[in-house]
């Protein structure tokens, strides 16, 4: 157990107000044919996103496998895509190739903004309007610089995109309000506790989109899009072979460890592991085969026992 990490996590929970800067991609899409093109590329119905709201979505390939998980933000006359840093360039190129086919414009805004995650439900004297979970709100900074806030996914708090020239001032502002700057280890604990998959660690282009187990990621009532046939077939005619879920562990294990059933059958593999101060146990994200997904199912990693726990491990931090 890392006691320093435990103390830092506990301090952040007690004060209920922390922040960290994180790397992401920010891509703008506009044009009269934006909705038409986007609806053919992602797993949610773009038309259904209200102005100043956002939805989680996936970019699949033709085989229904995952290129990226993104958040799609709808503004008055344009859309913004927030990507993980690992998938930014891939998604930018995926979108940009359609600019030659119609009134569809794509711009990479990543270098213009710094991205901060602010966590907690009791944030004191914050001068910007805090968004609801699926909401986008505006932020005005010095020198008429604009930014925006969006509600966090599976966490209490929000993300705020700040013009890069203002990022040091903004970080100081948070610290002056009493915010704790959250270190990378603690951020990883929170990520796993909240069941948020990380591309390249918990998912990649071998992952079929429904295997992530995030229901709001896919609309099954929209028109055709790349990979839809395979994704829809899994949903309507059968079930996934495996799904990302949680495990509570007796002891620490290594990522990529094989899971077995009590009868010795292959049951899946672990992707991420951490010690959870909330549970005072090691927890993991893992792809578990369909037959063993029921909550509480006992599995083995060698002589170590694991119990299946549906995601997220914890609710919003209160």
Image (spheres, helix red, strand yellow):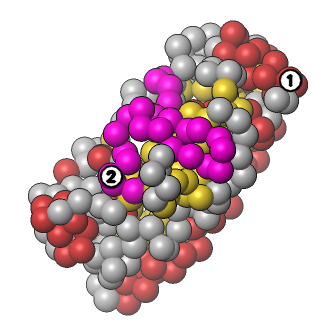
The answer to which quarter of the image holds residue 36 is bottom left
- Residue 79 in view (yes/no): no
Task: Classify mark 2: helix, strand or loop.
Answer: helix
- Residue that badge 1 annotates: 3
- The percent coordinates of residue 185 (x first, y second) are 77, 38
Asked if residue 315 lies in the magenta stretch, the reply is: yes
Write down the region rendered in magenta.
287-316
C-alpha gap between disc 2 and disc 1: 37 Å
**Residue at 74% across / 23% down in the picture?**
9
Residue at figure coordinates x 38%, y 89% from the top left: 100
Total count of labels: 2
Secondary structure type for disc 1 = helix
> Above or below — where is 196 with respect to 174?
below
Residue 164 in view (yes/no): yes
Question: Residue drawn at (48%, 73%), measured in percent from left and top?
Answer: 206
122 vs 179: above or below: above
User: Camera-side residue: 236 or 29?
Assistant: 236
Viewer-side residue, 237 vs 105: 237
In the rendered structure, does residue 24 fall within the stretch colored magenta?
no
Q: Position of residue 276 (x, y in %)?
A: 67, 28
Q: Which of the marked residues, 2 or 1, is nearer the chain's N terminus?
A: 1
Nearer to us of marks 2 and 1 is: 2
Question: For residue 151, which numbered disc appears in the image?
Answer: none
**Among all residues in the image, which is located at the extreme right?**
4
91 up-or-down from 125: above or below: below
- Viewer-proximal residue, 203 or 228? 203
Q: Give the vertical position of 309 relative to 44 (above or below).
A: above
User: Label 2: which residue?
Assistant: 291
> Looking at the figure, which quarter contains the N terminus?
top right
């Amino acid at each position: 157990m890392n006691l320093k990490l435990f103390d830092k996590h506990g301090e952040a929970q007690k004060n209920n107000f922390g922040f960290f800067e994180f790397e992401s991609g920010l891509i703008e899409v506009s044009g009269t044919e934006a909705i038409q093109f986007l609806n053919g590329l992602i797993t949610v119905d773009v038309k259904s996103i209200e102005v100043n709201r956002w939805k989680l979505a996936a970019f699949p390939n033709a085989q229904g496998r995952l290129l990226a998980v993104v958040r799609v933000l709808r503004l008055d006359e344009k859309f913004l895509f927030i990507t993980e840093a690992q998938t930014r360039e891939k998604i930018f190129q995926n979108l940009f190739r359609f600019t030659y086919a119609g009134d569809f414009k794509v711009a990479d805004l990543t270098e213009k903004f710094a991205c901060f995650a602010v966590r907690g439900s009791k944030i004191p004297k914050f001068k910007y309007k805090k968004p609801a979970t699926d909401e986008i709100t505006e932020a005005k900074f010095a020198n008429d610089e604009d930014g925006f806030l969006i509600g966090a996914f599976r966490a209490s708090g929000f993300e705020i995109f700040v013009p890069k020239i203002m990022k040091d001032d903004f970080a100081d502002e948070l610290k002056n309000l009493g915010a704790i700057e959250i270190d990378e280890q603690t951020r990883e604990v929170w990520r796993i506790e909240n069941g948020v998959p990380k591309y390249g660690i918990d998912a990649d282009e071998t992952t079929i989109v429904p295997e992530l187990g995030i229901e709001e990621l896919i609309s099954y009532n929209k028109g055709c899009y790349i990979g839809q046939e395979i994704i829809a077939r899994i949903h309507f005619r059968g079930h996934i072979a495996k799904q990302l879920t949680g495990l509570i562990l007796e002891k620490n294990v290594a990522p990529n460890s094989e899971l077995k059933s009590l009868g010795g059958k292959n049951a899946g593999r672990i992707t991420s592991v951490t010690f959870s101060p909330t549970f005072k146990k090691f927890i993991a994200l893992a792809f578990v085969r369909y037959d063993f997904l029921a909550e509480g199912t006992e599995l083995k990693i060698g002589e170590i026992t694991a119990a299946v726990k549906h995601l997220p491990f914890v609710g919003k931090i209160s």
